[in-house]
C-alpha cells in the first residue's frame, strides 16, 4: 500500500472506552503548511 | 496548609533528559518539584542514547542550515509531524547544544577544538553532535548534576524508586495530583501538585524483546489513557535496523556505526552484496531507520539471504582504522565485544532490526499540554516532533527541547491556569485508598496464569503482527488475541506475597496497562489503511504472509 495523503495525512487519536476497554480511533488535522508534502524516496537525493 | 502558599508545586514523573530539563526550568522560575522515578535518575533510559544529538552547528563548512534540518525531519517523518512544532525544535537545537556545552557535556571535538559532527541517517549534512558513543549518558549526567544543585537548595524533592500509578482529578476533571507507590516499602501515597508532567519514556516492553530498558513499559501512559488522556499515532513504532539480537533483550548498535562509514551487507551468489547501497544509491547505508529495517527484513525473510540462512546481516566497520573507531565509537564497540565475544574492529558485526522507539504517545499541543487540564507530557511519551518516523539523533533533541517547553509551561499553568477546586484531604485519601485496594487485590490473585509468560506471549504477538510489515488480517487476529490476553490477566497467580519490594505484584499491574497500550497500537495500525514511515501495510495476495517470529531464533547469538 502506498501513502494516502488524502485520507490519512492526519493524526491518529485514540481514546479509551471504559465500558468495553477498547480503543476508539478518530483522526485529527494538524499543521503542515510550511513544507508541501512530496513523495519520499531515498534512492534519489532531495531536490531543493 | 502549606508553609509558603506562593510556591508552586510541580510533580514531574520520570528522571530522564526531558524530566530533568523540565525540573531545572521549573526551579529557575521559582517553582518546587516533586520528581518521581522508577530508578535513580542517573539510570533513566536516556542513558542508553548513543549516537548523538542533531543540531545545525555547521562546524564542517558544509553550508548546513536550520531549514535543511527542518526539512530532513519533516521528510524523514513522512509528513506526519506538526511542522510548526518541528520548526520550534530545530531552531532551538543549536542553543541547546551550547547550553549542554556550558554545563560540561564532553562533546567530541576536532583537533582544532571545535565541535565535531558526524553523519546520521536521512541527512546529507554532518549535523550530529556527539560525545563518543555515549552521548545520552553524558547529557543525562550533566543534567543530574544541575538538578542536584537545586535539590541542595530545597527546590527538588526526589522520589526515587517510586512508581507513578495514576493522576488525581478534582471534581471539575482537572489534574491536581497523583498517586505513587514506593517500590521498596510498598507504601502508597497521594501527592498534591499544581501541574503534573509525565516524562515517562517509551513503551518498548510492550514488544517484549527490544532495545529499551525494562522500565520502558508505557505503563504510565496507559494509566492516564485509561483516565481520559488521548494517545496519538501509537501505530508508529520505530524498528531500529541495527541491534544485537539477544534472548533476554536486544542491544542497540548505534546508527553512528553507519554514520561513521559502516556498511551493511550479506552474501549473495558468494559475493558481498551491499544491498542498501544498491537499493538507495543517493543515501546508501544512511537511509532512515524504517527504510533500512524494511530492506534488511526483505533480504532476510523474503529473499532468504540472511547470514547462514538466519535472520541476521553484517554491519561492517572492519575496513575503518581502529584508532578512529576507538575515538568515535569506543563505548559501543566495547559493548559488542563483551556481549558477542568478537571484535568489531576486526570482523563484521551481526545485527538484525529490533523495536526501539515510539513516535506516537500522549497527544499534546505545541506547549505540551495534554487534553486533560493540568496534565502535561514531554519526551518520548508524547507524540510530537517525529511524525511517522524519527531520524536518528533527533530523540535526544526532542527530549531536551520538550523539557525546556513543558517546564515553563507547567509554571504558567500553576500560576495562571484555571485549576478549579483544591483537593481536600479526603479526596487524597480516597484516591490513595482506591489504588491500595487495587494493589491488595493483585496480592490475592491465585489463578493459573504466569504474568511473565503472558508478557512473552504479548511480545511475540506484537512482533508477529505489528512489526515491520502489517496486514489487516493479521492486525484483526492480533486484536482478538490481545483481548484474550486481557481476559487471561484476571487469572494470574501471584507467587511472591512479600510485603516489601514485591516486583511481581508491580509487574502484574504494569502488564494490564501494557496490554491496553498494545491494543491502542494495534487498533491504530488496523485503521490506518496506508503505508507511511514506520507503518508499512501490505495487501496479501493469497491470504498468507511469510512471517518471521522474532524471538524464536535469536538465542544463538
Image: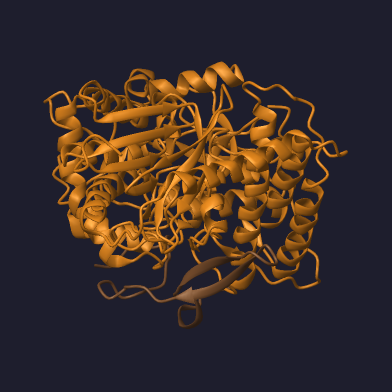
User: In the rendered image of this protein, does residue B338 appear above or below residue B52?
Assistant: above
Residue drawn 38% across the image and 26% down it: B329
Percent x, y of residue B490:
79, 47
Name the quadrant of the N terminus of chain B.
top left
Q: Quadrant of residue B392?
A: top left
Name the image colouring: by chain
**Left or right of residue B67, residue B510 in this image:** right
Q: Which of B477 and B181 is in front in this view?
A: B181
B14 in relation to A1, above or below: above
Q: In which quarter of the image is residue B339?
A: top right
Q: How many labels does the image show?
A: 0
In percent of width and height, residue B361 lies at: 47, 55
> Chain drawn brown, letter?
A
Asked whether the viewer can see residue B149, the reply is yes
* Residue B44 percent across, percent down from the top left: 43, 30
Outermost residue, bottom side: A6
**Can residue B49 be seen from the camera position used here?**
no
The hue used for chain B is orange
Instruction: Kindly identify the residue that appears in the image at 62 percent across and 22 percent down.
Output: B501
- Residue placed furthest toward the right: B448
Horizontal arrangement in the rendering, residue B51 relative to residue B208 (left or right): left
Most foreground residue, B132 or B186: B186
* The C terminus of chain B: image quadrant: top right
Across and down, in percent, residue B137 comes to 36, 27
Amino acid at each position: 500500500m502506498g501513502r494516502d495523503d488524502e485520507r490519512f495525512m492526519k493524526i491518529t487519536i485514540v481514546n479509551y472506552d471504559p465500558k468495553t476497554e477498547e480503543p476508539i480511533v478518530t483522526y485529527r488535522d494538524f499543521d503542515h503548511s510550511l513544507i508541501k508534502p512530496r513523495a519520499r524516496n531515498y534512492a534519489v537525493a532531495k531536490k531543493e | 496548609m502549606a508553609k509558603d502558599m506562593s510556591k508552586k508545586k510541580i510533580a514531574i514523573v520520570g528522571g530522564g533528559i526531558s524530566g530533568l530539563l523540565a525540573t531545572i526550568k521549573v526551579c529557575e522560575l521559582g517553582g518546587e518539584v516533586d520528581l518521581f522515578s522508577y530508578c535513580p535518575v542517573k539510570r533513566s533510559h536516556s542513558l542508553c542514547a548513543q549516537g548523538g544529538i542533531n543540531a545545525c552547528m555547521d562546524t564542517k563548512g558544509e553550508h548546513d542550515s536550520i531549514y535543511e534540518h527542518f526539512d530532513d525531519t519533516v521528510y524523514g517523518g513522512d509528513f506526519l509531524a506538526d511542522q510548526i512544532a518541528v520548526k520550534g525544535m530545530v531552531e532551538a537545537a543549536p542553543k541547546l547544544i551550547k547550553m549542554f556545552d556550558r554545563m560540561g557535556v564532553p562533546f567530541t571535538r576536532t583537533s582544532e577544538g571545535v565541535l565535531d559532527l558526524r553523519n546520521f541517517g536521512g541527512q546529507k549534512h554532518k549535523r550530529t553532535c556527539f560525545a563518543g558513543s555515549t552521548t545520552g549518558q553524558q547529557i543525562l549526567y550533566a543534567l543530574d548534576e544541575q538538578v542536584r544543585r537545586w535539590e541542595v537548595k530545597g527546590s527538588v524533592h526526589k522520589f526515587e524508586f517510586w512508581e507513578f500509578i495514576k493522576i488525581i482529578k478534582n471534581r471539575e476533571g482537572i489534574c491536581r495530583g497523583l498517586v505513587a507507590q514506593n517500590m521498596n516499602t510498598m507504601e502508597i501515597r497521594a501527592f498534591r501538585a499544581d501541574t503534573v508532567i509525565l516524562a515517562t519514556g517509551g513503551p518498548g516492553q510492550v514488544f517484549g524483546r527490544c532495545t529499551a530498558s525494562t522500565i520502558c513499559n508505557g505503563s504510565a501512559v496507559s494509566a492516564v489513557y485509561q483516565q481520559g488522556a488521548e494517545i496519538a499515532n501509537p501505530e508508529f513504532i520505530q524498528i531500529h535496523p541495527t541491534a544485537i539480537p539477544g534472548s533476554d533483550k536486544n542491544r542497540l548498535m548505534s546508527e553512528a556505526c553507519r554514520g561513521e562509514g559502516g556498511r551493511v551487507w550479506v552474501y549473495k551468489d558468494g559475493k558481498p552484496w551491499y544491498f542498501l547501497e544498491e537499493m538507495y544509491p543517493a543515501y546508501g547505508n544512511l537511509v532512515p531507520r524504517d527504510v533500512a529495517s524494511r530492506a534488511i527484513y526483505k533480504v532476510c525473510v523474503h529473499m532468504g539471504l540472511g547470514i547462514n540462512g538466519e535472520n541476521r546481516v553484517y554491519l561492517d566497520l572492519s575496513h575503518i582504522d581502529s584508532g578512529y573507531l576507538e575515538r568515535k565509537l569506543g563505548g559501543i564497540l566495547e559493548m559488542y565485544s563483551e556481549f558477542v565475544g568478537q571484535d568489531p574492529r576486526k570482523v563484521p558485526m551481526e545485527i538484525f532490526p529490533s523495536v526501539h522507539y515510539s513516535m506516537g504517545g500522549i497527544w499534546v499541543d505545541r506547549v505540551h499540554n495534554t487534553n486533560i487540564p493540568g496534565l502535561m507530557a514531554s519526551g518520548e511519551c508524547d507524540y510530537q516532533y517525529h511524525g511517522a518516523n524519527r531520524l536518528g539523533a533527533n530523540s535526544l533533541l526532542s527530549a531536551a527541547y520538550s523539557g525546556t517547553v513543558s517546564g515553563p509551561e507547567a509554571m504558567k499553568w500553576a500560576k495562571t491556569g484555571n485549576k478549579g477546586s483544591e483537593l481536600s484531604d479526603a479526596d487524597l485519601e480516597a484516591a490513595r485508598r482506591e489504588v491500595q485496594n487495587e494493589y491488595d487485590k493483585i496480592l490475592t490473585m491465585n489463578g493459573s496464569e504466569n504474568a511473565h509468560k503472558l508478557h512473552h506471549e504479548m511480545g511475540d504477538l506484537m512482533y508477529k503482527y505489528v512489526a515491520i510489515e502489517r496486514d489487516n488480517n493479521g492486525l484483526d487476529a492480533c486484536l482478538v488475541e490481545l483481548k484474550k490476553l486481557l481476559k487471561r490477566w484476571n487469572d494470574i497467580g501471584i507467587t511472591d506475597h512479600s510485603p516489601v519490594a514485591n516486583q511481581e505484584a508491580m509487574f502484574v499491574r504494569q502488564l494490564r496497562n501494557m496490554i491496553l497500550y498494545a491494543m491502542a497500537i494495534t487498533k491504530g495500525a488496523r485503521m490506518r489503511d496506508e503505508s507511511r514511515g514506520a507503518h508499512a501495510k501490505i495487501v496479501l495476495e493469497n491470504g498468507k504472509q511469510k512471517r518471521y517470529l522474532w524471538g524464536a531464533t535469536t538465542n544463538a547469538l
